[in-house]
């Protein structure tokens, strides 16, 4: 369980960074930025916990709130050190979705929910925070843009579930599935891969 | 209870079609389209179940997930057969809201909640999926546009509650209330009826 | 407990007014306006109750629904009497957020949740209804614009928690914290104070 918490903490920290940097690009004010950071970091997990009808993570464990605040503050303080803003945002975002996908899948599997539900909850945990961030920033959600985003989460979630079925050790499974998500998304962005658009010839 | 499930399945199927066709019009990518389909089909019911504090439908009954995927895939495959895109979207949307309104009202009444709550939950079940779909597609939600939309749901929900009070058989009640919703909306669109705008002289 | 209910009623009434007047400015139709009113008035409290996993206020106490409808209707009827529309909206909004902040904090404290959670739930109760209203109206949420908005709620929530710690009588605490919120926001708007923007030199 310990590793799960640490990964969750890292995910919250980097998603809070991603949130406040987005808000900063949008010239929002101070508290507006912290709210976007909070929503980005904890929105996906909050929805997952609501859907699972379990107590909300950050209400039960208030350290999540402080970690989100810390992540946002850290990003603000060292903002100037990030030379390539959009690239930095991309890296944080990618690490974040890989952590959150795996955590969502794990939580659902630990409650012995069906595999398809576990995959969906993984994807929801990973993507929903970013979707709310984008909606609040009046951006078209990143998830629907040309980058391969949800696809990476779905692939990672499916790999995790398969390796789990074959009883691969949890920590190894996390590393493999996490790397798959980060790998797919990075390759997709570097190579400018796209999924076929829906109005094309499918 | 059986009929309820079948109607719910139909509603999910057609709302998934409506969702992915909207995404297709927006030139979203493959998985983005499926996510919009899923949210459109299951978002309203998910909110209803959250508000009622009962287990989420598609977590308990995973067939909902597969039906949403099937509906979206069906719409993609036979897209070219739909000559009049916007009309097709309209028909699916209208059938969907009529199913979902009635199901939301029924669920609330079966939990012996007050009539006003049942009406509200019917309208929420019917309209919320579409509202999220439109927000995610950065459209002004259809519900607030000139077509008579929520109005039809409210009328159908009220009729259902009244007939329920007079102990009309459930299946007959469903047909009558469902037809009222479909009828009001169809007439409104065909005749280009509008509700008075709020800045006019009311 | 009685005073809490009355304050909550006032908050719902004025937020419903604020909601329908926003919808009216956007030239939405009749029912669209009522839905925006309902969401604005009850959205924040609904999210708070979902997060706390307690029964939703307006499902348990249906008078909330009628108060929201009454507030919206009142605003429509006397719309012409409001000479300065935007100022009226501002006043209602400010009273509303001050009521809701305090109620959110109180509810969390009464459940013996940590102080930081109480503050966050106060801010969520106060601001979330307005955020949904703005998103549905395709406006950039007011909370992220230049006015000091969330800041006032956070200050009021913190004051309430501190005075609560010093066992100041609840009613006095409510008045003081409520006035702080209204005061900060009014001064900020009158003096055109702003928080530093995030892309400036912090």
Image: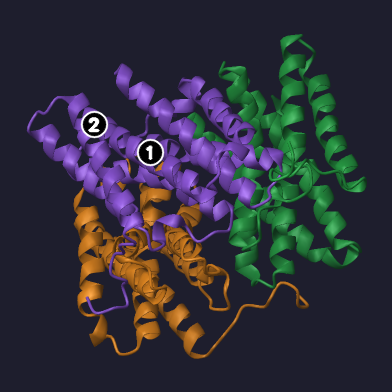
Chain colours: A purple, B orange, C green
- Above or below, A174 against A180 in this view is above
Q: Chain of mark 1?
A: A
Whether residue C73 is visible to the viewer of this picture, yes or no, is yes
Q: Which mark is residue B53?
A: none
What residue is shown at x 19% (from left), y 44% (from top)?
A: A158
Q: How many marks?
A: 2
Q: Which mark is residue A95?
A: 1
Whether residue C50 is visible to the viewer of this picture, yes or no, is no
Residue B122: image location, x then y, percent:
44, 58
Quadrant (top left, top right, bottom left, bottom right) of the N terminus of chain A: top left
What residue is shown at x 28% (from left), y 54% (from top)?
A: A151
How packed mark 1 is, by other alpha carbons closer than 10 Å (few <14, some 14-19, many 20 or more), is: some
> Reading the chain from its start, which is encountered first: label 1 or label 2?
1
Q: Residue furthest top?
A: C166
Left or right of C29: which side holds B63? left
What residue is shown at x 70% (from left), y 53% (from top)?
A: C16
Question: What's the distance in space between the residues labelled 1 and 2, CA to CA?
Answer: 13 Å
Q: Secondary structure at mark 1?
A: helix
> Can you tell which quarter of the image residue B31 is in?
bottom left
Q: Provide the residue designation for mark 2.
A: A174
Q: Nearer the viewer, residue A112 or A138?
A: A138
Q: Is disc 1 in contact with disc 2, using a CB cutoff of under 8 Å?
A: no
Q: Secondary structure at mark 2?
A: helix
Q: Nearer the viewer, residue A140 or C124?
A: A140
> Can you tell which quarter of the image residue C10 is in?
top right
- Above or below, A111 against B123 in this view is above
């Amino acid at each position: 369980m310990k590793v799960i918490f640490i990964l969750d903490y890292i995910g919250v920290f980097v998603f809070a960074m991603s949130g406040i940097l987005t808000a900063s690009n949008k010239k929002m004010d101070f508290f507006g930025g912290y709210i976007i950071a909070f929503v980005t970091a904890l929105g996906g997990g909050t929805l997952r916990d609501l859907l699972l009808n379990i107590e909300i993570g950050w209400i039960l464990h208030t350290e999540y709130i402080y970690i989100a605040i810390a992540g946002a503050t850290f990003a603000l303080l060292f903002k100037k050190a990030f030379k390539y803003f959009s690239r930095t945002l991309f890296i944080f975002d990618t690490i974040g979705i890989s952590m959150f996908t795996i955590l969502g899948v794990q939580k659902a599997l630990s409650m012995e929910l069906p595999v398809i539900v576990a995959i969906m909850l993984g994807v929801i945990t990973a993507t929903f925070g970013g979707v709310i961030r984008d909606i609040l920033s009046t951006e078209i959600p990143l998830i629907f843009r040309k980058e391969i985003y949800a696809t990476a989460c779905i692939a990672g979630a499916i790999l995790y579930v398969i390796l789990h079925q074959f009883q691969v050790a949890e920590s190894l499974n996390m590393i493999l599935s996490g790397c798959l998500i980060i790998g797919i998304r990075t390759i997709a962005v570097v190579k400018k891969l796209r999924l076929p658009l829906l109005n094309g010839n499918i």
